[in-house]
Amino acid sequence: MAATLTQRAGEGFRAGRPATTPRNGRRRLTKALHFLTFGAPGLLIYLALVMLPIVMTVRTSFTNRNPANPPTTWVGLHNYTRLLHDSDFTGALWNTVIVSVIVTVAANALGLAIALLLDRPGRLYNLLRSVFFTPVVLSSVVVSVIWQAILADDGLLDTVLRNLGVADPPGWLSDPDIALYSVASIITWQTLGFCVVVYLAGLAGVPTELLEAAEIDGAGRLARFRHVTWPMLAPAVTINTIMLLISGFKAFDQIQVLTNGGPGNGTTSTIAFQVVQTTFTGNHIGYGAAMATAMLVIIAALAVLALRILQRREVTL
């Protein structure tokens, strides 16, 4: 038996690879059993609830599926070429870009500033951290209803402004020139707590030895932040930017509750809102699937591009 194993091992090494032993076989079997026990259920759920709907949506986007106008036929790239000439879609895309830029920049800047202020020990600061994080755990619909009561015409904010002497307050949700920025501000307010928590975690990872050494060398607060704290926060910036970018592109609940795509003709309509309107209200399921697929491709491309740029910045810093 020993001679046989030795002969197999010699043949394996002569072939350029180690021979398979009973112990290696048992290890592989154990790993396979662990995967089937712990990994396979989660993988199956992910495939069923995420990947399968994506595949079905992409497939539907190449058809003219419309329950009100059967039969369903294969139209190829017709839906995608139609998107390029659809003013509603291009307008929604532009609105989505504006919302995403505002949310990403404003929430990152304000989140970092608030995290720097709250990066102190004490019960008061712990309480303030919880206060800032509260909007994150609230439903977007609940947040939108609250802000609708505040920003509506004759709402709380307009009432306060009139009492302060402002005769004609702006229509925060009814003025086509302001409504989109009001919605973007509300989304920024709701996502701000997430940025604060991520930046607080990043600040907790900054070595105090480096800060003390910089202070001993005569560096002021601004210099310590610029040369020590800011480079150490690069991973936090990456996480917040990617998450905020995705949140801005998939904004729907706030638009639906606050403005329903108005005022006017789609002045606050986003791609996600346009997908729902086209698919479920207009019954143009094939065309709506093409919109959803285009949105998925745009988000994935922007996320990958931003991730590469920010990760390269992490290495540089």
Image (cartoon, helix red, strand yellow):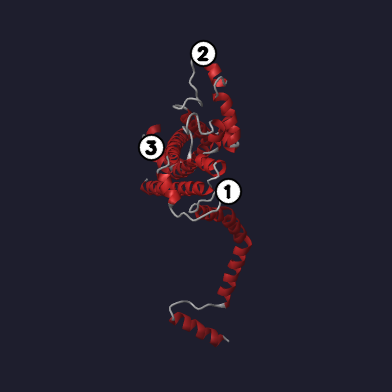
- Disc nearest the viewer among 3 and 1: 1
Task: Give the residue at mark 2.
Answer: 164
**Image mark count:** 3
Decide: marks 3, 2 in contact (CB < 8 A)? no
Q: Nearer the viewer, residue 252 or 66?
A: 66
Separation (CA) of disc 3 from disc 2: 41 Å
Mark 3, residue position: 226
Q: Residue 42 placed where, x, y %?
A: 60, 57
Give the distance between the C-alpha atoms of the residues marked 1 and 2, in whole angstroms.
54 Å
Residue 226 percent across, percent down from the top left: 38, 37
Location of mark 1 (residue)? 67
Residue at figure coordinates x 58%, y 25% from the top left = 149
Q: Which of pointers 3 and 2 lies earlier in the amino acid sequence?
A: 2
Secondary structure found at label 2: loop
Picture coordinates of residue 16, whole percent (x, y): 43, 78
User: Which of the 4 image quarters holds residue 33?
Assistant: bottom right
Note whether 106 is above or below 11 in the view shown: above
SS class, disc 3: helix
The tag earlier along the polypeptide, 1 or 2, is: 1
User: Position of 72 compared to 38: left or right?
Assistant: left
Q: Amino acid at mark 2?
A: Leu
Whether pointer 3 and pointer 1 mark residues with C-beta atoms closer than 8 Å, the reply is: no
Q: Is residue 94 above or below residue 45?
A: above
Amino acid marked by disc 1: Pro
Label 1 residue SS:
loop
Residue at position x 57%, y 46% from top?
Answer: 68
